[in-house]
Image: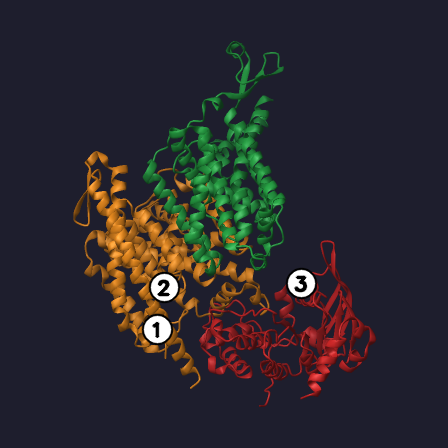
Chain colours: A red, B green, C orange
Amino acid sequence: MSSSKPTAVRPHDATMSHVHAGGHALELRQLRKSFGKTDIIRGVDLAVRAGERVAIIGPNGAGKSTLFNLISGRFPPTSGEILLGGVRIDGKKPFEINRLGLSRSFQITNIFPKLSVFENLRCGVLWSLGYKYTLFRFLADLRDANDRAEELMRMIRLDKKRDTLAMNLTYAEQRALEIGITIAGGAQVILLDEPTAGMSKSETSRFIDLIREVTVGKTLLTVEHDMGVVFGLADKIAVVVYGEVIAFDTPDAVRANAKVQEAYLGSVLADEQAATAGH
Amino acid sequence: MEFYIISMLNGLSYGLLLFMLSSGLTLIFSMMGVLNFAHASFYMVGAYVGYTLTQVIGFWPALVIAPLVVGLLGALFERWSLRKVHKFGHVPELLVTFGLSYIILELVQLVWGRTAVQFRPPEILREPAFTLIHHADDSLGFAWGSAPTEVCALAQTICSQFPATRAFMMLVAISMLIGVWLLLTRTRIGLVIQAALTHPETVETLGHNVPRVFMLVFGAGTGLAGLAGVIGGSTFVTEPAMAMTLGSLIFVVVVVGGLGSLSGAFLASLIIGVVQTFAVALDHSLIGLVQSLGITASEALQNNSVMRLTISQVAPILPYLFLVLILIFRPKGLLGNRES
Amino acid sequence: MMPKSHYAFKPYNVARWIIWSLFALVLLMAPQVFSSNLSVSMLAQMGIAIIACLSYNILLGQGGMLSFGHAVYTGLGSYVAIHTLLKVSEGAMNLPVSLIPLVGGLAGMFFAVLFGYVTTKKSGTTFAMITLGMGELVFAMSLMFSEFFGGEAGITADRMAGEPFMGITYGPNIQVYYLIAVYTFVSVALMFAFTRTPLGRILNAVRDNPERVEFIGYNTQIVRYLAFVIAGFFAGIAGGLAAIQFEIVTAEVVGPVRSGGYLLFTFLGGATFFFGPIIGGVLMVLAFVLFSEITKAWLLYLGLIFLFMVMYAPGGIASLIMMNLRVAAFGRLRELWVSYLGLGVTGLVVFTGAGALIEMVYHLQLSTAMGDTVQFLGATLNARSPDSWFGGVFILLTGLGLFELARRHFRLQWAEIQTDIEKEIKRRETQ
């Protein structure tokens, strides 16, 4: 099944020109976050190139979700900088960050339960197409929004469930819808928080194919626990332990990294290698 | 001088009454996420039940039994009604308590009538707790109970009394505060409640019957409101409108204090209680201020209704003004936590 | 194809034209059918209530914002409208009476802009409490600023002000009714159109998942604020129409009782469907005008009905209708009629017993001066005789028992039908 490139949406000019000039799509500089006296993120440096697919792994409690929350603006960092395409986004509100071209999905499915699949996707595209707070036009007349929503529905293979209310979908379908809403606005940098959580093996592999298809050409950061997914999807892996990135390299290099083996992977990795080798 | 002392004490006692009510509200909210719109209605029921029980068995037994009755009613309501809407979310829970407030109002009026009832405090509380005597030579005297009539009858001597009912109110409020604090922090059930405050599912997996804990907390919260009702009803007036007037006030208190914060509710209750009490006693108006500055205002300005408003007339809206100001300048409340 | 559930009438355009034409027809012909003075007045009030409740539902049903202070905006709209009317009467302003409701609308919008920013800073329960506080604030102020609010007596004006418009003076009730009818039709149409605009849809998204909305590029506070202002506009129109209808505005129009009424009846009618508040508005007028005359216990009944609605049918009457329409669309409605009959009959028995008891208690409490008997459903009950009491209790208990049986049977049947319908839907999807 061919992956259709999304139709052109309004470019995020500042970020795109920076990226075209060779800058990083997403940069974290000396990022720190404390909640009260507890340091969760203790100085993270990370530079992601445009189009890279980065998997963020690490033991539970290492701060992976916090990192995502910092990048997407859910709460501000205690210190340090976050740059999206060269533009500082630390301290900005989530909607401001989203408008600059970064979008995210959530660990716990976060869709609009009482709207239909189609409506969910259409909501996702409205702002990026410039419709903002319009109340003088009817949704039914917005050709580009409707076309894009239809296209997205086909991409995530939910076109048969066009009018089903999102709360009536199966779990895997809801996760697919979640991805659909995330990419709807045409964001260039996409954060996926444990996208395959709660899925069976077969659902997972199908889902990963879907993710690969719909994020062609985008910069992708995923938090993942499933090593099969990580090694299959990622160009680079960032290992986060106790709020610090202890390795950021290609999958093979990370596998061989002694620090990583000591801190985290170890036997888990051996199991996965055995499993994938046995296919 | 004595005016300030007495007013301050009055204000504090009123604030403590507000706290008795808003603490129960905050506990229920923190625990169950339900904002009990009918909380002031349970206060009213406490007052009326206290009144009836006082006729039958006397004030002091009523003081103990009425809150238990109210608490029981609250627990039953939780069991039969509130629990059913738990699954629909917080808005239906609020609505259910909203509907309950109507029903309670009607039932109370049905049983006890639409006019105020004479809920008098017991003999021992009818005397003033103490009297401050402002002597003619500007010195301040103090007397337990009421001052001798000859002293007060002297020229230029002002006797200001502090009612025993108010003092008793403060006593009960503070003991209640300490009691609840001890219960929450020192007993096993208190620990369970504290845990269930933030992690109800975890507590349930540990084997505790969380629905029953909820019922207990709701019953306890409403019981406290009932206790406040007995005290408030006997000190002030017991009438059908008492729920409405106090109801919106305690919601202001919890929002100003920071939703979910007990210490915030405490602070806000005291501030609002003191400010209200002082405001009601002051008769200054803007036009008075202007004139005292030596400025002669024009005829039109003198007759302007806004300029002529006295502080005591403005008193009713002060808490709500406070609410608006807090929302503009410090939206999470005085001591509120980060909005979760 | 089965009817969509949220904010869409049937997908065929023909059906849509029919429904709107029917609505217009009903508005046109209602006073011809119900032509007594009281009826026309009630119909006029229904139009006002429909606009008010629909405007309230922009907040509640569409935006998920529970407001306890909506009367502030209808009420202030009324006040500004009636002051304008006075100015027109005095000759200080030259504005046709027909446009006064628009003045009310603009006033409602103005105050919503003013108060709305602070109010919509928060959401959920905090928002509800803020609206409560705001409502109390304005209500308390009404006794302070007597030039604007008219103190205890309120403000009165004459609606036959200014030049007659094409012979219409707004003296007779029927003329005011038609003015209201026009505004009602236009307002309902506009508010329905709103639900189909980007802002309207994003408002629904904010209701469902405010956090997610931030991540699709929208500032949820602005969305709520705009919805608040729009609701305030239509609330003001309702208020302006009320000023013309009653020719008097008193402080209770901004009071907590009125706000509570909007909440109660919008919810009762059904907040999850567009037409729910229309039902709510009609019920509100029927309750306040007729129900309150029939029995003194009407507020108690209302409270109980509301309570049971929240517990058992939180979607309101509209959702009950739609659920049954869905069952009908799948051809299964006929099987339920026996169950419904059973529920109806046993429910009636319960009501008779409970009603008898409630009426007797109310009678004892409120009207003992007029003897011991009270009329209830054609029978004479003696509030002082133990027979009447025993009879009431007996009927109530029997009714409760039978009702419970009927309810269980109904529930089983309903659940079975629902499962069948779900299966059928899945089957149709995979075709």
Look at discs 2 and 1 and give the one toward the viewer.
1
The answer for which chain carries disc 2 is C
Return the residue nearer the eye: B93 or C154: B93
Label 3 SS = loop
Give the residue type at disc 3: Lys
Mark 3 vs 1: CB contact within 8 A? no
Chain letter for the residue marked with disc 1 in the picture: C
Q: Amino acid at mark 1?
A: Ile
From this viewpoint, is residue A52 visible? Answer: no
Label 3 and label 1: CA atoms lie apart by: 51 Å
Asked which quadrant contains residue B156, the reply is: top right
Question: How many C-alpha atoms fall within 10 Å of the one at disc 2: few (<14), some, or many (≥20)?
Answer: many
Query: Residue B91: where, in percent of width, then height?
Result: 47, 56
Secondary structure found at label 2: helix
Question: To which residue does mark 2 refer?
Answer: C188
- Amino acid at circle 2: Val
Q: Is residue A187 left or right of residue A249?
A: left
Please identify the residue farthest to the bottom as the structure is shown: A1
- Res. A4 visible in picture: yes
Camera-side residue of B96 and B331:
B96
Secondary element under disc 1, as helix, strand or loop, is helix
Kindly identify which residue carries mark 3. Answer: A92
Residue placed under numbered mark 1 in the picture: C417
- Please give the name of the residue rendered at 56% of the width and 33% of the height, measured from the top-left corner: B274
Q: Residues within 10 Å of mark 3 (few under 14, many from 20)?
A: some
**From the viewer's perspective, is the residue at label 3 or at label 2 nearer?**
3
- The answer to whether the residues at label 2 and label 1 have Cβ atoms under 8 Å apart is no
Is label 2 on the same chain as label 1?
yes
